[in-house]
Image (spheres, rainbow, N blue to C red):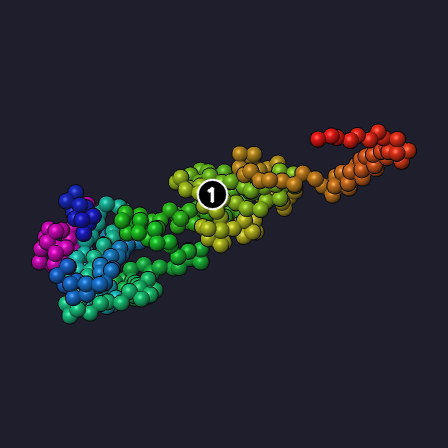
Amino acid sequence: MKYNQNKVDKGEAIVLDTNLSSESVIKQTKEFNIVRQQKPNLSKAVYHVSLNLPYEDSNKLSDEKFASLAIDYLKGMGFDENQYIVYKHFDVDHSHIHIVANRVNFSGNVVSDSQDYKRSESLIRKLEQKYNLSELIRKQESNVLSKGEIEKCLRTGDVPERLELQNILLEILNQNLLLKDFIDKLNLKGVNVKINQSLTTGFISGISFEYKGTFYKGSKIHKNFSWNNIKTKIITNEQNRNHSIIPKDYVGIRTAKTETVGDEKRISKISRSHNNESSENIKQNRPTNEEIKNKPKFRFRR
């Protein structure tokens, strides 16, 4: 509530709708806590969600319509008789709202948070149709976001950086480029690339990306961006056997096996020869039986 109220105080947000009687954060919190006392052992008593319109729909809903959508969302998620407050933010280019609701309702019952992400996604698809909004076309490349990424998105309203990187990679991968050109185009988008390549064979075993100060292994962005999948969409140095097309700056450090099979045979032969020579030297330096017999004996006295 404090985070959202700070936005209101800066002129970057408004209270779109609420059933709370107080206007200050301290008094609003007290209102929540009075109802929450019915379930004193409940650890997570507050529900917080951000609903973001696509850029093309930012001016499509009036404040009244957006408030109506928020109420439909709350009811659809089970918040029929609960305290809530809805904020509309103006701090980014696309319209979005933040909803803060008490999970404990006026009767003392708790709204379940079981599979809330899945239920929320299903409900939003229905609201897109009801309010004539652009329907989300789910991309195969989209991963389920981590808890940290979701929390950051809720705080800032910004698109998670990993999803931004996914979109950049997807756009450039579809251009059927040489590996060097693929890397150069990513650099222009602010993405640095590191290739894990053997120094002797040129074999590439992996790829990683740096975007906005964070390093991502290709498969951690999405399984479709592992090296094994990327190399099927670009012309790689492995395909044309010209290892020189990858600039050294892009090649990551990788321990390479320096011996070839031929070297191993040669080293093995040298080793056997050395062993034979060592044996002859030992034989030559080994004392004879006669020398051992004539060896003087010493006796120590205490």
Q: Quadrant of residue 110?
A: bottom left
Tag 1 secondary structure: strand
Q: Would you say residue 243 is visible in this rendering?
A: no
Which region shows up in magenta?
12-32
Whether residue 256 appears in magenta in the rendering, the answer is no
Foreground of the two, 100 or 285: 285
Q: Residue at x 26, y 55 (%)?
A: 50
**Residue 99, percent across and down?**
22, 57
Whether residue 150 can be seen here: yes
Left or right: where 207 falls relative to 112? right
Which residue does the image show at 49% across and 54% down from the upper left? 223
> Which residue: 31% across, 49% down?
152
Tag count: 1
**Image quarter (top left, top right, bottom left or bottom right) of the C terminus:** top right
Q: Could you say which quadrant of the image residue 111 lies in?
A: bottom left
Question: What amino acid is labelled 1 in the image?
Answer: Phe
- State the image coordinates of residue 249 (x, y, percent, origin top left): 53, 34
User: Label 1: few (<14), some or many (≥20) within 10 Å?
Assistant: some
| Pick the front one: 208 or 127 | 208
- Residue under circle 1? 209
Residue 190 lies, in percent from the top left, at 42, 39
Question: Residue most toward the front?
Answer: 302
> Is 293 left or right of 299, judged from the image as shown?
right
Above or below, 150 against 282 in this view is below
Residue at the image point whose x is 49% and y is 51% from the top: 219
